[in-house]
Image: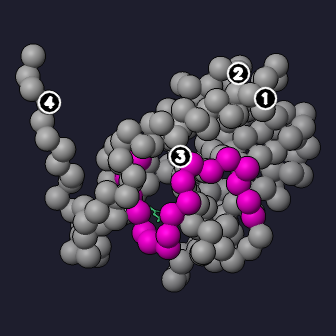
Amino acid sequence: MAAPQPFKAHPDIERVLLDESQIKARVQELAREISRDYAGRCLTLVGILKGSVVFLGELMRQLSVDCTVDFMCLSSYEGGGSTGVVRVLLDLRENAEGRDILVVEDIVDTGLTLHYLLDNLRTRGPRSLEVCALLDKPDCRKTQVKAKYVGFRIPNQFVVGYGLDYNEKYRNLPYVAVLKAGAIGGK
Ligand code: 5GP
C-alpha cells in the first residue's frame, strides 16, 4: 500500500480554517444531538442548493432517526451582497404540512435568505421548523434569525470548500478555507 501523502491544500487556498477531521467530528456531534432531539419522529431534511449538499450528505449518513430529504434552491438578487430579495428557483416536491422540517444550510451570513425562507416555510404549516447550518458568521447579521444547530461560528471572511463555492468552484474541497487574493476575480 502507498504511504499517505503529506497534506497539500489547493494552490488557490490562502489558509485552511477547518480541516476535514474537525468538520467530520463536529458533524457527528450535530447528528447525535439532532437524533436525540427528534427521537421517535421522522425528520424532513430540506437541503438548500447548492452549498449544503456536502454537509447534508455527511449529516444524514450519521443520523439515527428516520428521515426524508427534499431540496430548495433560492437565489438572492445580487448587487453588493445579499439584499434579502429572494427568488425560489426550485421548490419542495413534498408537502411540508405537519412535518418536522429541518432546513440544512451551508452558512448563515446576513441571515436575509434564511429569514425569507423560514417565513415562506412557516406559511405551509409544518409541525416544527428548525435550522441546521454548518457555518455561522454572527457578526454579519442584518436580521434576527437563529439556527438551532450550528457547526462552527467563524469570523467575517469569505470561505470556500465543503460545498461552498466561489464562481461555482471549490465546492469539492474537503475542508473550509480562505482563498488567496489572487484567486478572487479570476476564472
Ligand atoms: P445571507 O442571506 O445569510 O447573507 O446569505 C447566505 C448565502 O450566501 C449562503 O447560503 C451562501 O450561499 C452565501 N454565502 C454567505 N457567506 C458566504 C461565504 O463566506 N462563502 C460562500 N462561498 N458563500 C457565502
Q: CA distance from mark 3 to mark 2?
A: 20 Å
Kindly state the secondary structure of the residue where label 3 is placed: loop
Q: CA distance from mark 3 to mark 1?
A: 21 Å
Q: CA distance from mark 4 to mark 1?
A: 39 Å
Q: Where does label 4 land, which residue?
A: 4
Which of the two marks, 3 or 2, is nearer to us in this view? 2
Q: Identify the mark nearer the N-term, 1 or 2.
A: 1
Q: CA distance from mark 2 to mark 4?
A: 35 Å
Q: Where does label 2 land, which residue?
A: 65
Residue 103 appears left or right of 127 = left
| Marker disc for residue 38 | 1
Q: Identify the mark nearer the N-term, 3 or 1.
A: 1
Q: Is residue 70 visible?
A: no
| Marker disc for residue 52 | 3
Q: Are marks 4 and 1 in contact (CB under 8 Å)?
A: no
The amino acid on which the numbered mark 1 sits, given as a three-letter code, is Tyr
Q: Residues within 10 Å of mark 1 (few under 14, many from 20)?
A: some
Q: Identify the mark nearer the N-term, 3 or 2.
A: 3
Residue 168 appears left or right of 44 = left
The amino acid on which the numbered mark 4 sits, given as a three-letter code, is Pro
Does the numbered disc 3 mark a residue whose Cβ is under 8 Å from ligand 1? yes
Q: Residue at x 69, y 77 (%)?
A: 142
